[in-house]
Amino acid sequence: MEIRTNHLTKKYRKEVALDDLSFQLSGDKIVGLLGKNGAGKTTLMRLLAGHFAQTNGEMLINQESPFNNYSLSKNICLIMESNNFHDKFTVKDILKISSKFYPYWDKEYAEELREVFRLKPKKKVKTLSKGMYSALGIIVGLASNSPITIFDEPYIGLDAAFRSTFYDLLLESYERNPRLIILSTHLIDEVSKLFEEVVILQEGTLLLHESVDDLANKHILLSGNKEEVEQFASNKNVIHETSMLGQKTVVLYDETITDPAGLKVSRASLQELFVYLTKEEVKRHARAN
Ligand SMILES: Nc1ncnc2c1ncn2[C@@H]1O[C@H](COP(=O)(O)OP(=O)(O)OP(=O)(O)O)[C@@H](O)[C@H]1O
């Protein structure tokens, strides 16, 4: 599947949620969709799922618009943190309805997952705890086997052990049936190992879209004697710095680094990079590149 947005803009009355966003995603992979609160992630995912139309620009999946396009949107499963299922249905009903809707539904796998998350078939949606509700969403998302499977923070209320189970299942499901999986999360450290690519939105625009490997290679974390670090980092793109007791640490982004003699070289985590890159004062550095 190929996703392409061209100058995509979505406004809710005067509120601009997505602003002239152009990027492309294709192939089978797990992509992290990241951004601070209000960056436009949910809006982008709902446009992908065809929930509503954009205000301007294009949202194309395999060169077609998903809005009002059932033959396309049945290939896309979006699981959000809430409002996925009607309260009056039972767990069993939801799995049955999903089996009719999603063409690649795996009934046996759905049953297996229901057991893993210990959901009783007769339980009504409105009586599910937050964690159980999230588990039901995860079951539907994974068992849908949809060519584009999207999870928008689907783990609200799930404890750490079940979140870890979800990440294992996501990877296992991807390995059994490679497809384009988009996962939006604020718990970056927990899932960063699953991502092949990341898309970071900021204020409705694209801050960066990189493979995780390229992102790792595009930055460097240097530490050592304060004067030496400062001398080395002068005129370079510093996205983060800390100093203590004559020692200094800097993170340089998008710089060709040659032989920082005498300084300790390492890498920041994806979560740290996200925090540094989305800080207001460094926004322009990431955008410029
Ligand atoms: N239904 C709506 N009506 C008006 N404004 C909205 C609506 N939905 C979203 N917005 C606004 O659009 C912007 C983007 O919101 P969106 O929910 O897409 O961000 P997000 O990145 O998913 O945020 P979060 O991480 O907090 O879930 C925000 O300014 C938000 O207030």
Image (cartoon, helix red, strand yellow):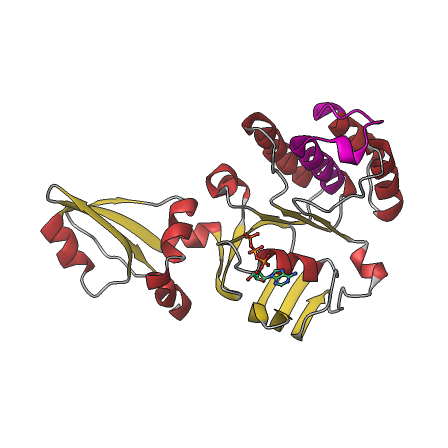
Q: Position of residue 64 (x, y in %)?
A: 76, 68
Q: With respect to residue 272, does 12 lie above or below?
A: below
In this view of the protein, can residue 130 be seen by the observer?
A: yes
Q: Which residues are magenta?
A: 115-142
Name the foreground residue: 189 vs 181: 189
Quarter occupied by the C terminus: bottom left
Quarter of the image where one finds residue 232: bottom left
Q: Position of residue 287 (x, y in %)?
A: 41, 67
Q: Residue at x 88, y 38 (%)?
A: 96
Please name the predominant secondary structure of the magenta segment in the image. Answer: helix
Specify whether 224 is left or right of 149: left
Q: Is residue 123 magenta?
A: yes
Q: Position of residue 134 (x, y in %)?
A: 67, 36
Specify whether 94 is left or right of 173: right
Q: Residue at x 65, y 44 (%)?
A: 81
Q: Residue at x 39, y 51 (%)?
A: 275
Q: Quadrant of ligand 1?
A: bottom right
